[in-house]
């Protein structure tokens, strides 16, 4: 997708977003679906005995008073909490399984339904607040949505070994969402006397994957998709994590270990010395030296991500160590490993395992190190072994033949009739032309991704947006838009303006035809009601603002105004 010139867009602080325009008109303009209609809750207690849906059971209902529940410092509105389950069964492993859920139905309902996709390996019913990625102050429940959350078909006690049970794998991959969606809409209809006028699904990490999979598999069920840091190729990303651990292990202190509760003996190899926090700071500073001013301002942020990838050179822009490492340089071996890591992991035979990662100053974040040095040894091997492989089997993370493991991701047998890659990834994701009907009926997709996400690559998301445009015969920005978040780690954190609301802009795009661009984002400094980000640079304002710009536009300094104010920048 080439950059297309458009009018300069000024950010209006009171608005959630601004409309953008394109110089290339689409072949046909998708319809605007129209606004939802509000309604009041008719019954709460009556849902315990009065709701019926095949394979569904309501276990408890509770009227929750306004302010009795809070999201951060934000009091939630009065609502009805419904807890229940679907498809109770005895698994092939002898364990009891069900798809557990909770729904929160506001007394004053805006006519919309929100499916909250949760992260990681699921296994817990998170509070159905409709929480949004990036440390926002509000969620979907606060905005008046009816919200559902689930455990995706297994409990925390079964995690990650639910992957040994074939149906539990399928529920986690995509079937729990497919089963819960019509039930939730029926529950809404019973509670309010009408079904939802508009339905939305969203989440970050695995929650973003759930939303992308739903777009490909359940396109008729949802009108808006809010997709954060989508691990839509989660098995491949897990292999890249193992690859990184193998490479870093050669640089780490021999024999050093660190405690971890999920490790078989309670400890894992300590890889943190392979690329220390001080060395990551050195690389981040080198990135800023080369790329910070590309957007017109030296402000400790790299807004022009793509230009930076062409400009920054790890080999020449970072000092090389002599006889010993001192934190201010990298050794030759470190540069080799880190350069290959950012270029994209490959098997021993040269087979690509996952996407490249973009260079960005947010690699200083603690979350970046946790994913690369801890989770790569404690979490990813468990998922690789028990959820993605056919047949399941043990993984030695530091010695695994990754090419052979990728073959197991594609395999099936008499017990596991769908491969790990098939059940986890959106059908047709390589050339997503199958989303054309979704676009044609007026549905919309908003994607966002921290540029310094260490586990799911922002470059993978950018490449998917490019592939979508090609599959649909031209730019797809009248249907799907991608918002990179410079400096942000996995879903939040890092030196970033990581507090924003993209659900409001998504609703306005779906229901009013207002195209999102220049979405306000702020830092979470001292006193922030949504939680403080302790990794912000000391010279930033506590509430630094920037517009989030839809790719390929970049937030550029207008040449005047405070570097702490979003209004000093424009998407172009």
Image: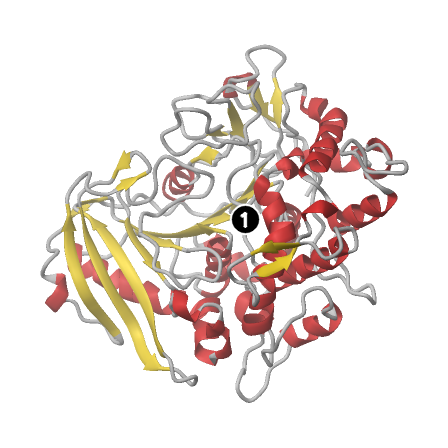
Residue shown at the point (67%, 69%) measured from the top left: 396
* Number of marks: 1
Q: Is residue 15 visible?
A: yes
Disc 1: which residue: 229
- Front residue of 350 and 332: 332
Say which quarter of the image contains residue 91.
bottom left
Residue shown at the point (72%, 57%) measured from the top left: 255
Residue shown at the point (54%, 48%) measured from the top left: 229
Q: Is residue 431 visible?
A: no
Say which quarter of the image contains residue 123.
bottom left
Residue farthest to the front, as pictured: 255
- 504 sits to left or right of 6: left
Picture coordinates of residue 331 (x, y %)? 84, 41
Picture coordinates of residue 217 (x, y %)? 47, 66
Picture coordinates of residue 356 (x, y %)? 72, 50
- 75 sits to left or right of 90: left
Residue shown at the point (69%, 70%) measured from the top left: 406
Residue farthest to the top, as pictured: 560
Q: Secondary structure at mark 1?
A: loop
- 19 sits to left or right of 64: right
Picture coordinates of residue 458 (x, y %)? 62, 46
Q: How is the image coloured?
A: secondary structure
- Front residue of 425 and 263: 263
Q: Is residue 351 above or below residue 366?
A: below
Q: Residues within 10 Å of mark 1 (few under 14, many from 20)?
A: many
- 166 sits to left or right of 65: right
- Front residue of 566 and 451: 451
Q: Where does the C terminus fall, quadrant-wise? A: top right
């Amino acid at each position: 997708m080439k950059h297309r010139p458009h009018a300069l867009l000024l950010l209006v602080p009171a608005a959630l977003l601004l409309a953008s325009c394109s110089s290339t008109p689409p072949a046909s303009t998708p319809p605007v679906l129209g606004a939802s209609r509000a309604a009041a809750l008719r019954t709460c207690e009556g849902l315990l005995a009065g709701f019926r849906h095949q394979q569904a059971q309501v276990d408890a209902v509770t009227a929750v008073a306004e302010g009795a529940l809070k999201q951060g410092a934000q009091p939630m509105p009065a609502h009805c909490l419904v807890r229940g389950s679907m498809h109770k069964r005895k698994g092939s492993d002898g364990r009891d399984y069900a798809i557990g859920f909770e729904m929160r139905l506001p007394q004053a309902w805006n006519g919309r339904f929100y499916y909250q996709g949760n992260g990681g390996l699921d296994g817990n019913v998170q509070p159905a607040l409709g929480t949004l990625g990036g440390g926002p102050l509000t969620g979907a429940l606060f905005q008046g949505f009816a919200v559902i959350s689930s455990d995706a078909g297994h409990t925390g006690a079964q995690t990650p070994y639910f992957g040994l049970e074939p149906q539990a794998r399928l529920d986690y991959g995509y079937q729990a969402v497919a089963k819960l969606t019509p039930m939730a809409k029926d529950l809404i209809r019973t509670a309010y006397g009408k079904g939802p006028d508009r339905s939305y699904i969203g989440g970050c990490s695995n929650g973003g994957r759930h939303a992308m999979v739903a777009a490909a598999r359940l396109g008729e069920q949802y009108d808006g998709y809010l997709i954060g840091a989508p691990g839509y190729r989660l098995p491949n990303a897990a292999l890249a994590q193992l690859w990184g651990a193998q490479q870093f292990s050669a640089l780490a202190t021999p024999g050093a270990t660190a405690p971890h509760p999920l490790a078989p003996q309670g400890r894992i190899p300590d890889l943190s010395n392979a690329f220390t926090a001080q060395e990551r700071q050195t690389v981040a500073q080198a990135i800023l030296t080369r790329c910070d001013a590309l957007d017109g301002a030296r402000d400790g942020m790299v807004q022009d991500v793509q230009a930076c990838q062409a400009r920054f050179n790890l080999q020449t822009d970072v000092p090389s160590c002599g006889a010993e490492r001192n934190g201010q340089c990298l050794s030759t071996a470190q540069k080799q490993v880190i350069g290959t890591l950012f270029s994209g992991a490959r098997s021993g035979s040269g087979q690509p395992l996952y996407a490249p990662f973009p260079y960005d100053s947010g690699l200083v974040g603690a979350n970046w190190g946790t994913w690369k040095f801890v989770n790569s040894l404690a979490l990813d091997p468990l998922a690789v072994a028990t959820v993605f492989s056919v047949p399941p089997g043990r993984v030695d993370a530091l010695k695994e033949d990754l090419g052979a493991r990728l073959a197991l991701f594609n395999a099936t047998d008499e017990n596991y009739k769908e491969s790990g890659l098939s059940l986890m990834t959106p059908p047709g994701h390589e050339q997503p032309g199958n989303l054309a009907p979704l676009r044609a009926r007026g549905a919309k997709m908003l994607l966002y991704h921290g540029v310094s996400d260490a586990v799911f690559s922002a470059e993978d998301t950018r490449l998917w947006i490019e592939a979508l445009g090609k599959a649909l015969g031209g730019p797809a920005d009248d249907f799907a838009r991608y918002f990179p978040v410079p400096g942000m780690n996995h879903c939040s954190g890092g030196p970033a303006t990581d507090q924003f609301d993209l659900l409001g802009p998504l609703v306005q795009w779906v229901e009013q035809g207002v195209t999102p661009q220049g979405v306000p984002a702020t830092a979470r400094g001292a006193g922030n009601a949504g939680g403080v980000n302790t990794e912000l640079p000391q010279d930033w304002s506590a509430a630094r603002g920037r517009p989030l710009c839809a790719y390929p536009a970049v937030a550029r300094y207008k040449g005047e105004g405070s570097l702490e104010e979003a209004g000093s920048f424009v998407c172009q």
